[in-house]
Image (cartoon, rainbow, N blue to C red):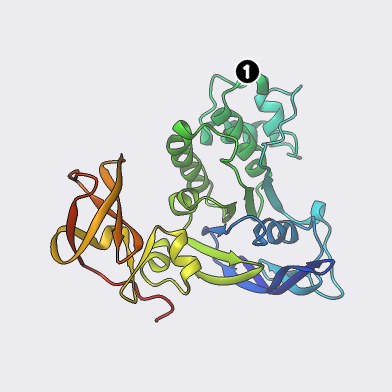
Amino acid sequence: MILDIRHISKSFGTVAALSAVGFSMSDGETIALLGESGSGKSTLLRIICGLEIPDSGEVFLDGIKYNDDQVFVRPEHRNIGLVFQDNALFPHLSVVKNIGFGIKGSNKKDAIQQMVQITRLEGLENRLPHELSGGQQQRVAIGRALATQPQLLLMDEPFSTLDHSLKNEIRSEVRRIIHASGKPCILVTHQIDDATALADRIAVLEKGKLVQIGSSEELYETPSSLYVARLFGTVNEIDGKLVRAEHIEVGTGEKIASLEMQYFETGNYVLQLNYKGKLLQALSQNPFTVGEQIPFTITKELLVGVK
């Protein structure tokens, strides 16, 4: 166990940002903190790295206590690498000088070269940040954070400033870099795609509370609440049952709905159906006609909060 967080609480005035949050993670594991704005995920990240002091609770890193009612280890004395949302590169320093900024010791040159290779920045060593693409700048920021051999890597909304068309490629590259480094990582994001692409487990925060933690498959198949279920896709209520859009089979069945709208998206037609006065969303590989009466059947019911 590399990180152990116990009963962390933090309030700002009368607003409870975190309420008794706790989980642990293994060495080499990547965990995503997922939730809407105001859920407490960035506050928790800041507490882990020492930029925020909790009102109560404990933080252990590799068995060493960093926080409790009497103990507070300052950020500069925590062996934690942090990648900021905007990468925060030094604009006047080259790639290698940015990567090597925090490295001390006689092996600095070798450590920089190792990070250049892991982040695939060969040939760009002498460029300044403004001469790099967004993805290249991000790789420099990750290389700088990893170059000091931290016990834990923290990433705060690392893809928020990137062009949507490049996200998939850059996420794959970031995952490769993290795995190549072997370092445990915590990622803060409000995007489900970022969490599922990078994380071994996802910790879902809602209004300052940790409501569920598990693999993306576990959270998709057995969500603890409707809030968690909706993070992983559209949930319809049909005759008292909760059903995902992909589990409505159109074109056959005894239930009949009227098609109000449809559009094509990523290989499927998304259908907006009116069933007993309620709007439902379903998927189909074939188009229908607006106003058409469409039969459908439920192939799988979603069990929320049932273990």
Q: Where is residue 238 drawn, in percent x and y?
A: 31, 70
Q: Tell me how many marks there are.
A: 1
Query: Is residue 284 something one can see in this rendering?
Result: yes
Query: Is residue 214 something one can see in this rendering?
Result: no
Give the amino acid type for the residue marked by disc 1 in the picture: Glu
Q: Residue furthest left?
A: 252
Q: Residue at x 50, y 62 (%)?
A: 202
Q: Where is residue 131 drawn, in percent x and y?
A: 63, 18
Q: Residue at x 47, y 41 (%)?
A: 171
Q: Residue at x 65, y 41 (%)?
A: 147
Q: Where is residue 139 drawn, in percent x and y?
A: 57, 34
Residue closest to the eye, 202 or 274: 274
- Name the side, left or right, on which 175 lies relative to 2: left
Residue closest to the eye, 80 or 288: 288
Residue closest to the eye, 29 or 251: 251
Quadrant of the rendering where the N terminus is positioned: bottom right
Q: Residue at x 81, y 71 (%)?
A: 55
